[in-house]
Image (cartoon, rainbow, N blue to C red):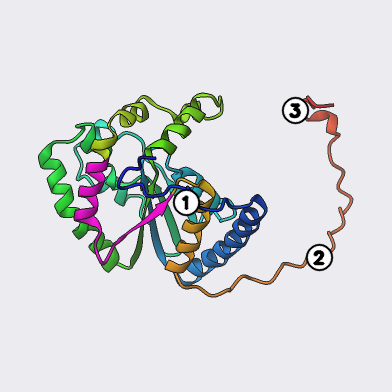
Amino acid sequence: MAIDKDAESSELGREKLSKSFYEKELLRLQIELVKQQEWIKEKGLKVVVLFEGRDAAGKGGVIKRITQSLNPRICRVVALGTPTEREKTQWYFQRYVAHLPAAGEMVLFDRSWYNRAGVERVMDFCTDKEYEYFMHSCPHFERMLIQSGIIVIKYWFSVSDEEQERRFKGRINDPTKQWKLSPMDLESRDRWVEYSKAKDEMFAHTDTKHAPWHVVEADSKKRARINCMRHLLDQIPYEDITPDPVELTPRKSKGGYVRPPMSDQTFVKDYYE
């Protein structure tokens, strides 16, 4: 099977994860992420996690599993759309800076400022000058973030062309996922080689010691999810400071208060009697 050089993630020859093991490990990791969340809040840490990769590589799936049990006031997801005409005139990093975390927060970027090195470069949405400026300034920008106290973690989800094709076909045939397949996704499918070159050039300039790329082999969605979650836990050392369970005290008496009749309220019809 032909596999692109940036997608050495074939499941050939590997034992498939059992559903029971995956679900058990997923739950264990989610519990640990809750502990890590409490540590981030208590210590006032500022964490930024970037998720990049080809279309249908599984970024959204792992973000969903990471945030599933976390407090959205502490851990939030940023997925920016197409920049407005006003944003196009701003300093390129400006609209991303507005979403950076304050103390005690973790922000997950579902695609990030690396749009310029990927889709904008391949689709000619930026000029050569803008692209070259980004490649030169991005390492300095990330160094400034880190020097200001922000923890920056970058993930690249690597998927083979065969697996991406299979997932695209699955989206076409699934009414709940058809919205995930945009004209831009179809265009990227036809520009596989161009995206490979753009990714390689991006790594050459931005895979730095202070902000390295962590590649997640993503042909197996389940492996990619739990591998990424476990790696994320290792990037931020933490201790278990989870508060003790709250004890429920007896409810107070109604004090003679009589509530209005339920017939005064408008209820949603029970469609499944």
Mark 3 is surrounded, within 10 Å at the Cα level, by few (under 14), some (14 to 19) or many (20 or more) other residues, namely few
* Residue 135 pos. (x, y %): 17, 50
* Residue 122 pos. (x, y %): 23, 35
Q: Nearer the viewer, mark 2 or mark 1?
A: 1
Q: Nearer the viewer, residue 151 or 19?
A: 19
For marks 3 and 2, the one nearer the N-term is: 2
Q: Which type of secondary structure does the marked residue at label 3 adopt? A: loop
Q: Which residue is mark 2?
A: 249
Specify whether residue 115 is in view. yes
Q: Nearer the viewer, mark 3 or mark 1?
A: 1
Amino acid carrying mark 1 in the image: Arg
Res 196 → quadrant: top left
For marks 3 and 1, the one nearer the N-term is: 1
- In the picture, the disc for residue 242 is none
Mark 2 is surrounded, within 10 Å at the Cα level, by few (under 14), some (14 to 19) or many (20 or more) other residues, namely few
Q: CA distance from mark 3 to mark 1?
A: 31 Å
Q: Residue furthest right?
A: 256
Compared across the picture, whether 12 is left or right of 128 comes to right
Q: Which residue is mark 3?
A: 268
At horizontal 49% and vertical 24% (from top left) the residue drawn is 172
- In the picture, the disc for residue 76 is 1
Residue bounds of the magenta highlight: 196-217
Q: Which type of secondary structure does the marked residue at label 1 adopt? A: strand
Q: CA distance from mark 3 to mark 2?
A: 32 Å
Mark 1 is surrounded, within 10 Å at the Cα level, by few (under 14), some (14 to 19) or many (20 or more) other residues, namely some
At horizontal 58% and vertical 73% (from top left) the residue drawn is 240
